[in-house]
Image: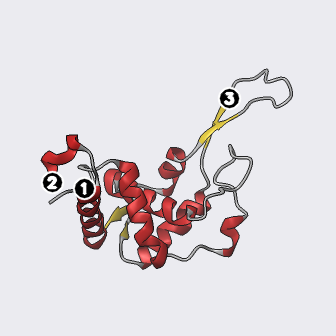
Amino acid sequence: MATMYDVPADALIQALAADLEDRLDEPDWAQFTKTGASRELPPEQEDFWAVRAASLLRKVADTGPVGVERLSTEYGGAKGGSNRYQVSADKRTDGSRNVIRTILQQLEQEDLVETAEGQGRRITAEGRSLLDETAGEVLEDLDRPELERYA
């Protein structure tokens, strides 16, 4: 059986996003909010919420238990220095904690993620099986000869 480590991350996230799009509801405010202080505009993807949820589910499964603070650091970016003459160096900024926290709460309601007291969020058995089933489907659909040994 294929696991999430056997398939490329981008293919797994796209397949998971298609499944999570029906299960999760994007809040009304999500279309107006930026994903971090380093961004100028909100995301333009139609399925941004589902893609970010799939990415978060994979990241929690990979590095869990993990908290919102560490996840916001991973989803952050570089904010430009002085905007007129670019005289100061770029500064590191975190991603939006509200977006991450809201998605994690929705994943908890779907029983894919659970809270470990004092440790952060970790994946449940149902979430792990969803990742592994999706990875198996992705592996069957991939047309990459170097991955045939995992099938």
Which image quadrant for residue 23? bottom left
- Give the mark nearer the N terminus: 2 vs 3: 3
Residue kind at label 1, given as amino acid type:
Leu
Q: Secondary structure at mark 1?
A: helix
Q: Secondary structure at mark 3?
A: loop
- Give the mark nearer the N terminus: 3 vs 1: 3
Work out how far the residue at label 3 is from the one at label 1, CA to CA, in angstroms.
39 Å
Q: Residue at x 69, y 46 (%)?
A: 39
The spot of residue 136 in percent (x, y) is 23, 61
Residue kind at label 2, given as amino acid type:
Ala
Q: How packed is label 2: few (under 14 Cα within 10 Å), some, or many (20 or more)?
A: few
Q: Are marks 2 and 1 in contact (CB under 8 Å)?
A: yes
Which image quadrant for residue 13? bottom left
Work out how far the residue at label 2 is from the one at label 3, CA to CA, in angstroms.
44 Å
Q: Residue at x 55, y 77 (%)?
A: 25
The spot of residue 42 in percent (x, y) is 70, 56
Residue placed under numbered mark 1 in the picture: 139
Q: How packed is label 1: few (under 14 Cα within 10 Å), some, or many (20 or more)?
A: many
In the shown orientation, is residue 87 left or right of residue 116?
right
The spot of residue 63 in percent (x, y) is 34, 50
Q: Secondary structure at mark 2?
A: loop
Q: Is residue 74 above or below residue 55?
A: above
Q: Are marks 2 and 3 in contact (CB under 8 Å)?
A: no
Residue placed under numbered mark 2 in the picture: 151
Along the line of sight, the residue nearer the viewer: 44 or 107 = 44
Residue kind at label 3, given as amino acid type:
Asp
Which numbered mark, 2 or 3, is in the foreground of this view?
2
Q: Are marks 3 and 1 in contact (CB under 8 Å)?
A: no
Q: Is residue 149 above or below residue 49?
A: above
